[in-house]
């Protein structure tokens, strides 16, 4: 895959990169108010789009972002039923590398797609800050829900994965996820034990066309004929496969062209990059 090769080249530049790890720990509260207890985080997404109220009671972390300007997400003036906030907040000085408890969510804005998260520093709950939560810029927002981070660590850290893009019908390449981390320049991702590929972005890593947890994949191919197991792991179609195996490799085709005669049925399955040809349900050609 060309995209993967480009990413590998980029990752070579990261071998000396320092990764900012969220520290999950308890703090002694300096404020006069006792914060709410954290609610269990049930989502497998960091950003909840329209389900914003589910953030109430969650602790979030703002990673350091270097010179990037994130102040557009901070309210400079915001009247609410709580107070009138008019002091400009600097992201790097007041938010970066700190934890906050989301105490409430307000929809008191002129935009239906914009909410305001009311947050308090975990270290000092006497203070209150307000940040915009905008649906159309979710990927640009940089806070991380601690419950989400913990969930990702439990799902990935210490487990082995198939690198499907670099596997083939004879060799299955695997790697170990060392940890789930937050990088100040690249965001969330996993650290691997591959020297030339130490960091994989989370969005790319969660694409099962590229990476698949070893035990889960082994269960999928348990009943696959031995000569085809590594092909399915690598998403490589091979002559002699049946339709079920092709679906496991490529998924549903965009189009099927079929021809029937007295002696046989031939089909052409059309994919974005490949054409797969069947005769009586068995792969006889790949183009």
Image (cartoon, rainbow, N blue to C red):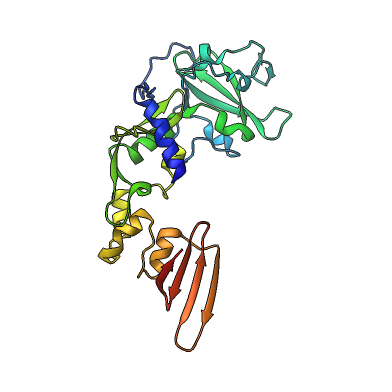
Estimate the x, y position of residue 57 in percent, counting from the top left. Answer: 49, 29
Q: Which residue ends up furthest to the bottom in the rendered image?
A: 262
Picture quadrant where residue 123 is located: top left
Estimate the x, y position of residue 197 in percent, counting from the top left. Answer: 34, 34
Q: Is residue 201 visible?
A: no
Q: Which residue ends up furthest to the front in the rendered image?
A: 287
**Could you say which is closer to the camera, residue 6 or residue 143?**
6
Q: Is residue 8 above or below residue 224?
A: above
Q: Which residue ends up furthest to the left in the rendered image?
A: 226
Q: How many marks?
A: 0
Q: Is residue 9 left or right of residue 178?
A: right
Residue drawn where x is 51% and y is 83% of the image: 260
**Could you say which is closer to the camera, residue 282 or residue 181?**
282
Residue drawn where x is 27% and y is 64% of the image: 227
Q: Is residue 270 above or below residue 278?
A: above
Estimate the x, y position of residue 273 in percent, counting from the top left. Answer: 50, 56
Estimate the x, y position of residue 119 in percent, counting from the top left. Answer: 54, 21
Q: Is residue 272 above or below residue 73?
A: below
Residue drawn where x is 67% and y is 35% of the image: 113
Q: Is residue 102 visible?
A: yes
């Amino acid at each position: 895959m060309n995209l993967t090769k480009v990413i590998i080249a980029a990752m070579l530049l990261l071998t000396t990169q320092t990764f900012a790890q969220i520290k999950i720990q308890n703090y002694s509260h300096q404020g006069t108010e006792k914060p709410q207890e954290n609610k269990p985080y049930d989502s497998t997404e960091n950003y909840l789009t329209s389900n914003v109220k589910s953030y109430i009671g969650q602790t979030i972390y703002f990673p350091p972002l270097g010179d990037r300007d994130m102040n557009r997400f901070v309210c400079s003036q915001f009247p609410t039923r709580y107070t009138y906030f008019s002091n400009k907040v600097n992201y790097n000085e007041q938010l970066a590398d700190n934890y906050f408890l989301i105490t409430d969510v307000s929809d008191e804005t002129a935009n239906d797609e914009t909410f305001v998260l009311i947050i308090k520093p975990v270290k000092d709950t006497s203070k209150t800050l307000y940040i915009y939560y905008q649906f159309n810029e979710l990927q640009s927002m940089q806070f991380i829900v601690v419950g989400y981070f913990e969930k990702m660590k439990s799902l990935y850290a210490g487990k082995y994965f198939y690198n499907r893009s670099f596997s083939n019908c004879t060799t299955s390449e695997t790697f170990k996820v060392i940890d789930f981390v937050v990088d100040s320049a690249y965001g969330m991702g996993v650290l691997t034990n591959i020297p030339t590929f130490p960091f994989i972005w989370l969005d790319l890593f969660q694409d099962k066309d590229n990476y698949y947890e070893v035990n889960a994949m082994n269960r999928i191919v348990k009943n696959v004929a031995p000569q085809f197991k590594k092909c399915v792991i690598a998403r490589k179609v091979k002559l002699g496969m049946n339709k079920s195996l092709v679906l496991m490799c490529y998924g549903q085709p965009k189009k099927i062209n079929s021809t029937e005669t007295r002696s046989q049925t031939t089909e052409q399955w059309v994919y974005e990059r490949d054409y797969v040809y069947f005769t009586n349900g068995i792969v006889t050609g790949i183009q």
